Image: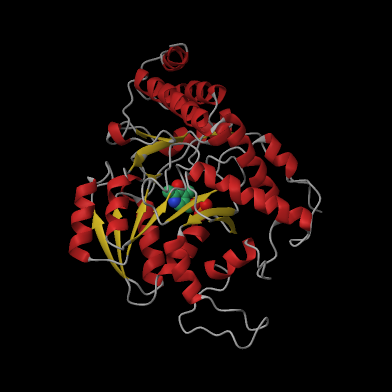
């Protein structure tokens, strides 16, 4: 016999997944519709329009891909890359290397511009490297979740536009939590996900791209064999499932028969986006910023140090240096098992060196911030950390009452 699942209630303050909005969980139990039911097509059309708003774009193309955020990253890159194409990846954290990995598997010629993970690039340094390498594509992460750094993009985007270079940007950790301006910054393809600031479970990726990209995709379109035997294309995209040239024709008027859409996830996305728009996108940014200031005030009041360049810190992630002699995982275990609070560790060179507190979507709430700070202080004291007692929550409350 197997028992019914009985999950513990958690306060999730990681950089994803975050707590789904209760409205979102409710709409997910809406009855199933067929993926070509006119009632469902109307929902898809609204989702397309709503996706564009936090992206700051008037692009015609904006839709969701079934799969987590990395499905969108992979679809974007393999849609553009043909074997031997040159791609430049400026890397200041973990997720840049994911972009590189995808490009390498697509047989691109990848050049990395690397630096330490504690700050972002000067935009001019990236532009100089574009001039040197002369790539077809520059792929960059906007908000690097591994270290909490956020890369300014607008000069790079303008340079790419003026020089016929494709600019692909991972905005997974910033979409909805910090301004993303696809059109103004000259981004050709931007990718986001659902389980971060959209407050929806993991399982969809959001994508938008402009006409420049559409032209490439149109030139590579190949109809599936079972639908037509005489629509072959030598330049076809290597994946069927993540083929943007087909996905676009599923989300637009042609409505080609591709995959069976996860209608329940689209309901969830519709509600997540609707809640963001109802709050006001700018108000959402302000909420994330205010909660971020409160988290930082609380952490510093304990005498802990925030990792990395503070001038380019993301509002959605706070990396905290683990003090000498403190077992980072033991503190996280106490938080999870005794307080029901989840925070994150980090990756690569930051593994074991920093904790990360996420501040995203429905999890970005005052009561969560105060709860995580109170629990964190107690867990640190319990594990023998020499911190200032009784200051963290007070500092955060003072920040809220400024
Ligand atoms: C979370 C994250 C991803 C990966 O998202 P998945 O949904 O797990 O595929 C990619 N890039 C960044 C910057 C992220 O924060």
Q: Nearer the viewer, residue 393 or 60?
A: 60
Residue 237 visible in image? no
Task: Tell me the quarter of the picture where residue 305 sits.
Answer: top left
Residue 101: give x, y in percent of width and height. Answer: 38, 64
Q: Quadrant of the C terminus?
A: top left
The number of numbered badges drawn on the structure is 0
Check the image and tell me how it is coloured: secondary structure
Q: Is residue 35 left or right of residue 325?
A: right
Residue 64: give x, y in percent of width and height. Answer: 59, 55
Q: Residue at x 48, y 45 (%)?
A: 55
Can you say whether 50 is above or below 89 in the image? above
Q: Quadrant of the N terminus?
A: bottom right
Q: Nearer the viewer, residue 18 or 275?
A: 275
- The residue furthest bottom is 230
Q: Residue at x 23, y 53 (%)?
A: 126
Residue 157: give x, y in percent of width and height. Answer: 32, 51
Residue 86: give x, y in percent of width and height. Answer: 30, 70
Residue 214 visible in image? yes
Can you say whether 129 is above or below 26 in the image? below
């Amino acid at each position: 016999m197997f028992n019914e699942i009985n999950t513990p209630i958690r306060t999730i303050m990681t950089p994803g997944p975050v707590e789904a909005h209760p409205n979102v969980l409710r709409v997910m139990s809406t009855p199933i519709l067929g993926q070509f039911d006119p009632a469902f097509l109307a929902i898809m059309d609204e989702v397309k329009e709503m996706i564009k708003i936090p992206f700051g774009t008037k692009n015609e193309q904006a839709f969701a891909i079934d799969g987590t955020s990395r499905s969108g990253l992979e679809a974007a890159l393999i849609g553009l890359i043909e074997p031997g194409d040159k791609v430049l990846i400026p890397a200041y954290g973990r997720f840049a290397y994911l972009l590189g990995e995808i490009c390498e598997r697509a047989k691109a010629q990848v050049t990395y511009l690397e630096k330490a993970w504690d700050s972002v690039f000067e935009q001019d340094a990236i532009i100089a490297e574009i001039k040197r390498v002369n790539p077809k594509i520059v792929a960059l992460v906007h908000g690097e979740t591994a270290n909490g750094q956020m890369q300014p993009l607008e000069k790079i985007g303008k340079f790419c536009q003026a020089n016929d270079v494709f600019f692909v940007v991972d905005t997974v950790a910033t979409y909805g939590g910090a301004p993303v301006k696809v059109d103004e910054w000259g981004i050709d393809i931007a990718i986001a996900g659902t389980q971060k600031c959209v407050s929806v479970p993991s399982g969809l990726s959001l994508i938008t791209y402009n006409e420049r990209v559409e032209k490439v995709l149109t030139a590579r379109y190949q109809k599936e064999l079972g639908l037509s035997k005489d629509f072959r294309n030598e330049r076809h995209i290597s994946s069927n499932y993540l083929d943007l040239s087909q996905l676009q024709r599923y989300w637009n008027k042609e409505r080609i028969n591709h995959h069976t859409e996860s209608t329940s996830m689209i309901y969830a996305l519709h509600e997540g986006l609707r809640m963001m728009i109802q709050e006001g996108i700018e108000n959402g940014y302000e909420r994330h910023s205010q909660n971020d200031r409160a988290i930082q005030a609380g952490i510093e009041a304990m005498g802990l140090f925030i990792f990395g360049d503070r001038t380019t810190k993301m509002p959605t992630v706070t990396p905290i240096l683990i003090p000498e002699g403190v077992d980072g995982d033991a503190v996280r275990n106490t938080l999870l098992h005794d307080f029901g609070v989840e925070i994150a560790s980090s990756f690569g060179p930051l593994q074991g060196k920093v904790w990360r507190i996420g501040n995203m979507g429905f999890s970005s709430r005052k009561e969560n911030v105060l709860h995580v700070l109170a629990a964190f202080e107690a867990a640190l004291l319990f594990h023998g950390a020499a911190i200032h007692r009784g200051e963290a929550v007070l500092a955060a409350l003072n920040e809220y009452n400024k």
